[in-house]
Image: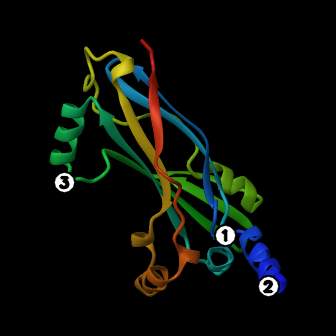
Amino acid sequence: MRKFSLLWLLICAVPPAWADTIAARRAEVELVDGQLAVSTRFNVRLTTGLNEALQQGLPLTFRLDFELTRPRMTAYYLNFRGWFSPHASLAFRLSYQPLTNRYRVSIGSLSNYYQTLPDALRAIGSIQGWRVLDPGSLNGESSDKIAGLVRLELDVGELPKPYQLNALGSPDWSLSSNWITLEVKGGS
């Protein structure tokens, strides 16, 4: 019985390898001229399998999603209009450049290069003042009546097809933060 208790204690004490691979450090939203401006920062840690794939030249795409939850009628309208997809998304593409031994993080056509992987991972999901809704979408709403959710995840759909099949059966390939609730700060 004592051996069983010791074994059980060791199993519980060791966290799974994929736990807390993406965690929010900061997530804020501000109401500015009837539009929401989101600012986020995440801690991203790659699993061993993802790190190896990145080093072998596989680019990884992370998607930052925003969903409006209040006011409810506006959120329902946006859900219906977008067929239940997130109300706004932003893609961060991480790649390794073996010739220069640098990492590249791209958001759309903008790119930055980093000397180390930890520096590049700090850039994934970090955004300041990202406008997520159409201008004037929330005119007349008070900031205490507006809320939303934000999350960062590895976009498995952007991987080549053989890797997508790997991702389906492996927790090593499914990185995602939890949905983080955003309470809106008042702005101009």
Circle 3 residues within 10 Å: few <14, some 14–19, many ≥20? few
How far is the residue under mark 1 from the one under mark 3? 37 Å
Q: Position of residue 112 (x, y in %)?
A: 63, 51
Residue drawn at x 71%, y 74% as measured from the top left: 98
Asked if the residue at tag 1 contacts the one at tag 2, i.e. Cβ–Cβ closer than 8 Å, the answer is: no
Residue drawn at x 16%, y 46% as measured from the top left: 81
Q: Amino acid at mark 2?
A: Met
Q: Position of residue 43 (x, y in %)?
A: 66, 51
Which label's residue is closer to the chain start, 2 or 1? 2
Which label's residue is closer to the chain start, 3 or 2? 2
Classify the position of the N terminus by image quarter.
bottom right
Q: Position of residue 113 (x, y in %)?
A: 67, 55
The colour style of the image is rainbow
67 lies above or below 93: above
Between marks 3 and 2 in the image, the one whose residue lies nearer the viewer:
2
Q: Amino acid at mark 1?
A: Gln
Q: Which mark, by number, is residue 1?
A: 2
Residue 159 lies in quadrant: bottom left
Q: Find disc 3 in the rendering and name its residue.
A: 83
Residue 7 lies in quadrant: bottom right
Asked if the residue at tag 3 contacts the one at tag 1, i.e. Cβ–Cβ closer than 8 Å, the answer is: no
Circle 1 residues within 10 Å: few <14, some 14–19, many ≥20? some
Q: Is residue 127 visible?
A: no
Residue 26 lies in quadrant: top right
Q: Which mark, by number, is residue 97?
A: 1
Which of the pair 62/148 is nearer the observer?
Answer: 148
Q: Amino acid at mark 3?
A: Trp
Asked if the residue at tag 2 contacts the one at tag 3, i.e. Cβ–Cβ closer than 8 Å, the answer is: no
Q: Residue furthest front?
A: 1
Using residue 66 as the reference point, say whether residue 41 is left or right of it: right
